[in-house]
Image (spheres, helix red, strand yellow):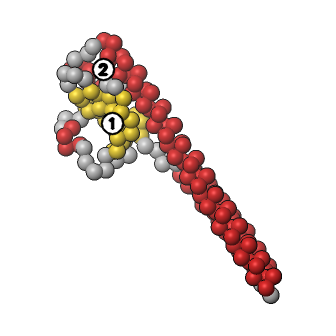
Amino acid sequence: MKYDIQLKTKITFVFICTFILLVGTLWRFHTQYIYNKSLEIANTYEKYEQELYTHRFNKRQTIDYLKKFNFTPITDPHAFFQKDTKMIIMKKGFEMIEYKESYYLHILTPHFRVLFKDNIHKIETQFLQYIFYIVILSLFTIIYADIKKYQR
């Protein structure tokens, strides 16, 4: 009987440790994917900013130039910045902002500032990752329950 209790304790301990490692690994993959996606978009924004800097566009020219790339200027940027606004990347000349499932490009120059909504890039929720996580968790739980059933 004592041997049976120790075995159950060891199996439970191994299950909990493996579960924590699994959750940590999947969380790391998820955050790395989001970071890589944001970095890819930031590199695109940096190319736009370099073009603006090279040609020394004024405010009107900047708005017209970025409208060609499907950006929409925000008319009242002061009302835009709220609690749930998340600054993702700040580089010289621009800021990349996340707000309500969209990316925003904030152009910063010594003479003017303009905020644009990016209509091309959206914040994507990776449902495939969540489904994979749920399937792995379900299989793991079934295996654990099956092992516990044979211990009785």
* Image location of residue 76, percent across then percent down: 18, 38
For the point 22% across and 28% down, which residue is it? 113
* Image location of residue 117, percent across then percent down: 31, 35
Left or right: 133 as drawn, with respect to 82 = right
Q: Quadrant of the N terminus?
A: bottom right
Amino acid type assigned to the residue bearing label 2 in the image: Tyr
For the point 31% across and 25% down, which residue is it? 93
The residue labelled by disc 1 is 104
* Image location of residue 84, percent across then percent down: 31, 50
Observer-nearest residue: 90 or 6? Answer: 6
Observer-nearest residue: 4 or 151? Answer: 4
- Cβ–Cβ under 8 Å for marks 2 and 1: no
Observer-nearest residue: 28 or 132? Answer: 28
SS of the residue under disc 1: strand
Q: Residue furthest top?
A: 55
Please determine whether, in this image, residue 134 is positioned above or below residue 149.
above
How many circles with numbers are drawn on the protein?
A: 2
User: Is there any visible trace of residue 5 in the rendered image?
Assistant: yes
* Occupied quadrant, residue 78: top left
Q: In the image, which is nearer the foreground, mark 2 or mark 1?
A: 1
The residue labelled by disc 2 is 65
Left or right: 74 as drawn, with respect to 152 = left
* Occupied quadrant, residue 123: top left
Left or right: 40 as drawn, with respect to 15 = left
Distance from Cα at disc 2 to Cα at disc 1: 16 Å
Circle nearer the N terminus (2, 1): 2
Left or right: 112 as drawn, with respect to 107 = left
Please determine whether, in this image, residue 88 is positioned above or below residue 19.
above
